[in-house]
Amino acid sequence: MSPGPDFMVTLKQTINHGKRYAYYSSFGIGLGIAVHVGYTLLGMGLIFKNLPYFLDVIRVLGALYLIYLGIQSLKSSNNSILITHENGINFNLYKSFIIGFFTNLLNPKATLFFLSIFTAIVSIDTPIYMQSLYGLYCILANIFWYILIAKLLSKENSLNLFNKYQNEIQKTIGVVLILLGIKLILL
């Protein structure tokens, strides 16, 4: 939810080309997440079956990563998002989709994030159908989140409101990430 590459792509598509283009980027982001979820479920299941203690190692590393993200969020400065328009650029919905997909797919933070989250909710005994439902939830939640962002930020008043409270939003997200990381360590 915090402003990262996916958020910035959604914002840029919304401002420069309109919310319809941002919706397509949101679907691209969702497909990127599907790839992360897929290899996390397939790869992690195989590793956990052969090395059950590895789950604890990944869980602690993931927890430390979430704490790191939380600290970074707490240290972030309040930078307002400025509206700039790109004129004369040939753009289409397919390009918007591809930009969303590759932005998420090539983001190393997404890999670490999914490993962190999945190790918090998935155990050796979690059935694959339940793991798949968790993955589907992540995909759909992100698609709908970025569609909502595009819809809200397509209005100048909403963007101004976001800029006004961005610092508080970042700090709150930082605290939540740190608490989640601590909880994972204490499991």
Image: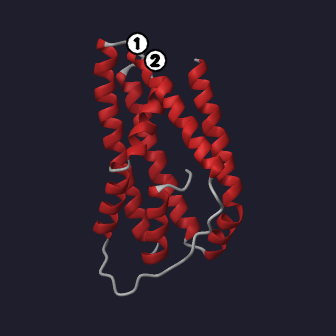
> Dots 1 and 2: beta carbons under 8 Å?
yes
The answer to whether 17 appears left or right of 157 in the picture is left
Crowding at dot 2, Cα within 10 Å, few <14 / some 14-19 / many 20+, comes out as some
The residue drawn where x is 61% and y is 48% is 73
Q: Residue at x 34, y 87 (%)?
A: 88
Q: Residue at x 33, y 13 (%)?
A: 51
User: Residue 125 falls in which quadrant of the image?
Assistant: top left
Depth order, front residue of 104/80: 80
Question: x, y (%) of residue 87?
Answer: 39, 86
How many numbered circles are shown?
2
Disc 1, SS: loop
Where on the picture, by quarter, is residue 43?
top left
Residue 107 placed where, x, y %? 38, 49
Question: Is residue 85 placed above or below 62 in the rendered structure?
Answer: below
Q: Residue at x 46, y 17 (%)?
A: 56
Q: CA distance from mark 1 to mark 2?
A: 6 Å
**Of 135 and 64, which appears nearest the observer?**
64
**Residue 111 bears which disc, if any?**
none
**Colour scheme shown:** secondary structure
Q: Is residue 135 above or below residue 53?
A: below
Query: Considering only vertical position in the picture, is 35 above or below 78?
Result: above
Q: Which mark is residue 56?
A: 2
What amino acid does circle 1 point to?
Answer: Tyr
Q: Is residue 86 visible?
A: yes
Measuring from the top left, give residue 180's x and y in whole percent: 60, 32
Report the amino acid beneath label 2.
Asp
Give the farthest residue toward the bottom: 88
Q: Which residue is mark 1?
A: 53
**Residue 145 image offset from top left, x and y in percent:** 52, 53
Could you tell me if residue 121 is visible in this image? no
